[in-house]
Image (cartoon, rainbow, N blue to C red):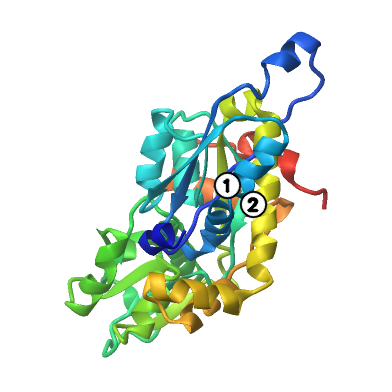
Amino acid sequence: MKKTFCIMLSFMTALTVAGCGKTSVKEEASLNSTDHLNIAKQLVLGYTPLYIMEEKGWLEEALAKAGYDIEVTYTEFESGPPENEAFAVGAQDLGVMGNVPAISGIAAGQKRDIIGIAYNGERTLGIVVQNESDITEVTGLKGKKIGIVIGSIAQDFLNAILTDKGMVMEDVELINLGVSELETALVTGQVDAVAMWNPTMLKICADGAGVLLADGTGVYAGENVIVANQEYTAQNPEIVKIFMEQYQRAVEELKSDFPGYAKEYSSVTGLPEELLIQTWENSNFPVGLTAKDQSELKNTAKFLYEQKLISTEVNIEDYLDFSFSEKE
């Protein structure tokens, strides 16, 4: 696991199960008969529970105990857009990603559902400016260059922050960068600010490369979702249910010992223990969906369509599967 975790620093998680309903004996026999489960993960600390589950082998254990002989494969992606490409060609069954790529994939015609919330939190994303910057308020970003992973949750976050201050996206210039390019671009002056999620946001500040201008407090929930291929969940509901149960188990494991996991992963991630703990403390790990999540995701879908970032309007209610969530 350390080897795996070293590359990533974040994490992904998985997806869940489509509702089944009553089936005949013949139909039941055809369900849950797959020989594989492909899970997409990402370099985001909020997805740590997925890595714990992978390291401990809990999913494979639970599947075997339930009588399934399935090959579980975890594949890592740097961000949502490339993960979307893998889902588009049928290479992934379950995965975790930000709200923007999740909805963008749906708008592009991918047959997927959102089955859970991997993590969220108002302090999980932020805007960071240069140390000596004269930008001290969000309104000071007008006319400035902002480094961002276009097509990611950070774009929706930035829009929410600007809107809260009476601004629009057209007031700033977006510079599309990879996650690994953000800090260098800020330090060298290629951009005036960056909008990003944790741990990258906290790392830039910890490195002394920038200072936090604003996070999502009071404005943005930061929904990072668990997505599922509709065909896979329809055909393998029990398998997906087992995945979700083990993901919840891994969440409880992480929450029970932030310091212990920070100590374990600090040496392999290159990040100080305090930063890891802060990242997890700033995050919620609900797993299940709620009405509030539905409202937040509806707002994101509306933003993407109004900004012409997606060409098809998405009725988010049609793509939320509450089968694995407790009733509010």
Q: Nearer the viewer, residue 173 or 233?
A: 233
Q: Name the side, left or right, on which 210 lies relative to 15.
A: left
Residue type pointed to by label 2: Tyr
Residue drawn at x 51%, y 69% is 124
Residue type pointed to by label 1: Ile
Residue drawn at x 28%, y 58% is 178
Would you identify the image quadrant in which residue 257 lies? bottom right
- According to the picture, the residue beneath numbered tag 1 turns out to be 226
Q: Name the side, left or right, on which 267 lies relative to 51.
A: left
- From mark 2 to mark 1, how far is it between C-alphas? 10 Å
Q: Nearer the viewer, residue 221 or 56?
A: 56
Q: Please tell me how crowded label 1 is: few (under 14), some (14-19), or many (20+) other residues with Cα within 10 Å.
A: many
Q: Is residue 6 above or below residue 290?
A: below
Return the x and y of residue 273 as percentages of the image width and height.
48, 81
Which is nearer the N-term, disc 2 or disc 1? 1
Q: Residue furthest top?
A: 26
Would you identify the image quadrant in which residue 235 lies? top right
Q: Which of 247 and 112 is in front in this view?
A: 247
- Disc 1, SS: strand
Q: Is residue 298 above or below residue 64?
A: below
- According to the picture, the residue beneath numbered tag 2 turns out to be 247
- Disc 2, SS: helix
